Every structure is written in structure tokens, then in C-alpha cells.
Amino acid sequence: MAYPTVSAPYGLQPINRVDGLPYAGAVRQVPIASTYNTAIFNGDIVRIAAGGTIQKSTVTVDSTTAAANNTVGVFVGVQYVNSQGQTVQAQYYPGNAAATSAVAYVVDDPMAAFKVAVTLSNGAMSTVNQSAVGANFSIRQGTGSNTTGDSAVSVYATNGEGNAAALPVRVIAVVPDTQANATAFREVIKLKADTSEESQARLETWMTVADGDYSEYSIKGAVDASNYYDQVEGDFDKLKLSYEWAWLQELFNKS
């Protein structure tokens, strides 16, 4: 069984509210000017432009430094009239003058919580652990997919992470489906190197006991880590590969 992995950024996806209530799908409809020629993808951060219309925000590290970096919410779809006069409801706005009477669907609830992928500064997929909760992160912009309609926006794993109030994203939780496998694999690698009775008992627990959502991925990650440690005979340089997200993801996809 393969692990649940994230192969590419997908923008921001509303999943809940900060106060614990479920996200019910509420959106605000805001017009897009017919002269606006920039594509907006599902999950892109957007802003209110002059005239009260929606545009894609270019925010990275500070949403207050320029009007283009302002934010009002997240784009999750659009309705427009195409060049044939047909009304189209779509995942993304194509960004051309052929799309008229366009109305963006925007999640602008200040209590909304979003899921977003983590990348390195070069765009490679990455991950964070529980220690990231409470930190502020910067945004990595990207060009979305005309095929899926999804955004390519992500947050940086290490660039700009900290407590600076200007950073646009606050981490309130770590998504478990991408955390469980990496956490188990790395923890078991450390335990395998320690031959103490306590560590060996913890190792056995990691490899046999789990409960709740994604528990099977935790056990699978632990078993894979134990097998890998034995395979490389504890070679330190090879074990360090477990801290590279791209390497972990490739290994998980093969399992």
C-alpha cells in the first residue's frame, strides 16, 4: 500500500473553522473586471482591487507593503460568459477578455482554516512537524494548472518561518495524513541506533501499535524504516536521507 503523499502544491483548501465548527462551503461572490487578463486558480489568494473587483494577490512575506500584496480571501471557483455566449462555471478563471461577466467565488470568512502544501524555496515538496504550530510562514507563489484548475501556491518550510507579524500564514495544526508516515519513519531510524532496553521496547511499539486515522501508515512507516536501517547496515550517510522529503516521498510511493 502506498502512503498518502502530496506530489505538488494545490493552493489553499478550506477545511474547517478556527473555532472548531465545520466549514459549510460559504463563499462571497465578487466580480472580476473583464479587462483583467491574469488567470486565477482554485486555491489562489486574492485581493480586492480598485473598483471592488477581484484580482490575484502577489503576497509572499508581507500583505501590507503594497496594494498588490493585500489579501481578502481564497479563490475557489468562478462563473463567467465565454466567447460563444455560454455561461460557464469553472475551477479557475482563464484570464482573458473572452470571459465576460465573471464572478469569483471567494472564501473570505476570517475564521476559516485552510490546508496548504509545504515546499522548499526551490519548489520541491517538503514537510513540517508539530513544532511549526504557532509559527508564521511566508507564501511561495506559483502558476496553477490549466488541466486541473488548481493553484500552485504553497508555504515555505524554512524561508521566513517565525513570529514576524507581517508573515501572511499562521500554522494552527499539522495535517496528519502527511505527518504520520514521515514521523514514524524518522523516529524508528533513531530508535534502531539505540540498543537500550527502553528504546527497543519503544521500537516494538512503533512497529505494532497504532490507533485512529492513518494508523496503518504509521505502522507501515515504522516497519519500512526498520527494514531500511538493516538494509544499509546503519550507514549514517544513508540514514540521513530520511530527512529529505523528496527521498521519503519516492520511497513511500514504491511501497
Image: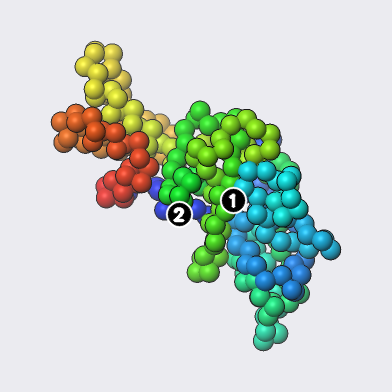
> In the displayed image of the protein, which residue is found farthest to the right?
51
From the viewer's perspective, is 120 left or right of 47?
A: left
Nearer to the camera, 172 or 167:
167
Q: Position of residue 116 (x, y in %)?
A: 55, 47
Give the total of numbered labels. 2
Q: Can residue 89 be seen in this snapshot? A: no
- For label 1, the residue is 12
Q: Are marks 2 and 1 in contact (CB under 8 Å)?
A: no
Q: Residue at x 76, y 53 (%)?
A: 67
Q: Position of residue 62 (x, y in %)?
A: 67, 43
From the viewer's perspective, is 46 left or right of 173?
A: right
Q: Secondary structure at mark 1?
A: loop
Q: Residue at x 24, y 33 (%)?
A: 237
Q: How is the image coloured?
A: rainbow
**Amino acid tagged 2:** Ala
**Amino acid tagged 1:** Leu
Quarter residue 196 falls in: top left
Above or below, 234 against 90 in this view is above
Q: Position of residue 111 (x, y in %)?
A: 71, 41
- For label 2, the residue is 8
Q: Which mark is residue 164?
A: none
Is the residue marked by circle 2 packed among few (<14), some (14-19), or many (20+) residues within 10 Å? some
Nearer to the camera, 238 or 254:
238
Q: Can residue 242 be seen in this snapshot? A: yes
Above or below, 225 against 87 in this view is above
Q: Position of residue 215 (x, y in %)?
A: 39, 36
Q: Residue at x 62, y 71 (%)?
A: 94
Q: Residue at x 55, y 65 (%)?
A: 149
